[in-house]
Amino acid sequence: MKNKIVALIGLAVLGCSYASAQEGMQPAMSEFYKPVPPVITPGGEIRGGGFTAPSDAIILFDGKNLSAWESSNGGPAEWKVKDGIFTVDKSKGDIRTKDKFESFQLHLEWRVPETIKGEGQGRGNSGVYLQGMYEIQILDNYNNPTYVNGQAGSIYKQTAPLANAMRKPGEWNVYDIIYTAPVFKEDGSYRTRPQVTIIQNGVVLQNNTTILGTTEYVGFPKVVKHGEGPILLQSHGDPSEPISFRNIWIRKM
Ligand code: MG
């Protein structure tokens, strides 16, 4: 009873100070005008797909060539470009952007062949690595169950997506990824952890989810100090027909 009275008195005091802080307020006193968000031209809609790049985006693939990319082993990116899209060449390994990034907004579109076969992780497996460190899973999960923290839109082996928003094999899937880079302490631990929001085909899969560390196939996440890093696309060794990409752009934040 005594504790309850103390708590009530505390709330009353807090309430009074909050009320007094509001006295004399005018609407304009809680409005601010600077810095002004930059005015940009939003992209146009693509039938069956996402948006074309806005005016301030860095184009990572515009349908013509892989000049923004390199092999993660060094040397040119040698995946196949044809008819405005590019397709993983599993004999050539992963590719990554030549540019490196901190926090960003990334748009990419991906598609598995209509004729794809296989199951679980062995069907249309790829992935997009943020800063070259953290894999957001790309996988054909259309009527294809697997461990949920390894399905499309998962932070691989960490956090399952909030929904399965897959389109059928043969149709394009759109990812919009909003990523906040981590800040590290001197000793290599996180001061603030990386965070990510993922939207697939207009559906939120990750809502400002905290990334715990590296996305390991075996074992738990590791905290590894790093700076700016590339966008990396995974060449996965699964035996199914390879995945294709189109319309990739990024905005630094
Ligand atoms: Mg993968």
Image (cartoon, grey):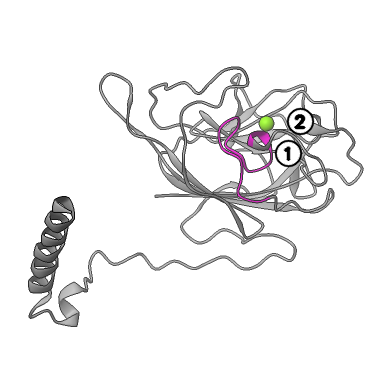
Question: Disc 1 on helix, strand or loop?
Answer: loop
Residue assigned mark 1 = 139
In the image, the segment drawn in magenta is 149-163
Tell me the quarter of the picture where residue 187 sits.
Answer: top left
Q: Nearer the viewer, residue 128 or 81?
A: 128
Tell me the quarter of the picture where residue 217 sits.
Answer: top right
Question: Disc 2 on helix, strand or loop?
Answer: helix
- Residue that protrudes farthest toward the right in the picture: 115
- N-terminal of the pair, mark 1 or mark 2, is 2
On screen, residue 25 versus residue 218, left or right, reads: left
Quadrant containing ligand 1 reads top right
Q: Residue at x 78, y 39 (%)?
A: 145
- Residue that protrudes farthest toward the front in the picture: 1
Disc 1 and disc 2: Cα gap in Å?
Answer: 7 Å
Quarter of the picture containing the N terminus is bottom left
Q: Residues within 10 Å of mark 2 (few under 14, many from 20)?
A: many
Residue assigned mark 2 = 121
> Is disc 1's CB within 8 Å of ligand 1?
yes
- Residue 65 spot, x, y in % from top left: 68, 42
Magenta run includes residue 154: yes
